[in-house]
Amino acid sequence: MKGRVIAIVMSFFCAIAFSAENIPDSFYKKRQEIVELYKNLKPKIFSEYVPGVKRRINTSEKIIAITLDACGGKKGNGYDRALIEFFRQNKIPATLFMTSLWIDANEDIARELARDPLFEIENHGYRHKPASVNGAVVYRRRGTISPEDLFDEIELNALKIERLTGKKPIFYRPGTAYFDDVAVRITYSLNYIPMNFSLVSGDAAGLSSSKIAGRILKFSKNGTVIIAHMNRPGRGLCAAFEKSLPVLKKRGFKFVKLSDYKDKLQ
């Protein structure tokens, strides 16, 4: 009962925060449908590797998808301009997972990136919460606490991205990349693909640029999906990509956006 009350309060404040952007009636109707479908289900798994979450491209082609998270929040609102300019100069496409926290702190940059056909903007959540229905905790971060709370986490940010780009996002990756199994089912019910990765760059762990580059060169293979962060300037990620991506190109790899291969994900 207590969790339900908290969920209602959180949803109320989320709606207030978004009220200026005119939430459609269909939002509330769909939220109620999700609550009714999933309110009695108990999760059994909470992990980055839950069945149904996509992690790589199933292909024999020499392709790699680079995904960059923009997490937002107190220490997460930075922008690695040098990294993005490196991608632009070398015509390397990427899929950018943004939260509302980051978009709100970087509105002009977000609009600029949304206009650039080299990139696609995808859903990293409204408040960068892990995707759960019972408030599961990972890395000291509490996840969404109910189906209703998860719905708001996904759909409020989806609305923001749609208004930014003119189209609904295709993929959802939660804060910390953790899902529970009920959250995965809810994600599919909302017509999004739950998306993680097959190769962790290591930038979030503070690895040096040489170690990040070494990981990318050692573990990249056909269909690899790399996760890194575009909100951590000065952490060495740009230098790591400058070292590794030209080598991968010489090996015959090309870089793609996730949406180009959404039907081949596994």
Image (spheres, helix red, strand yellow):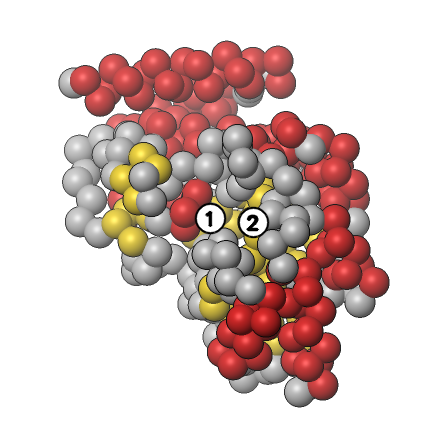
Residue beneath disc 2: 69
Q: Are marks 1 and 2 in contact (CB under 8 Å)?
A: yes
The location of residue 192, given as percent across then percent down, is: 47, 47
Residue at position x 44%, y 14% in the image: 13
Please tell me which of labels 1 and 2 falls first in the chain: 2
Residue at position x 52%, y 50% in the image: 171
The location of residue 207, given as percent across then percent down, is: 51, 62
Which three-letter amino acid code belongs to the residue tagged 2? Asp
Q: Is residue 152 visible?
A: yes
Residue at position x 57%, y 52% in the image: 229
Residue 173's tag is 1
146 on left or right of 89:
left
How many C-alpha atoms fall within 10 Å of the one at disc 2: few (<14), some, or many (≥20)? Answer: many
Q: Is residue 265 above or below residue 31?
A: below
Q: Is residue 188 above or below residue 157?
A: below
Secondary structure category for the residue under label 2: strand
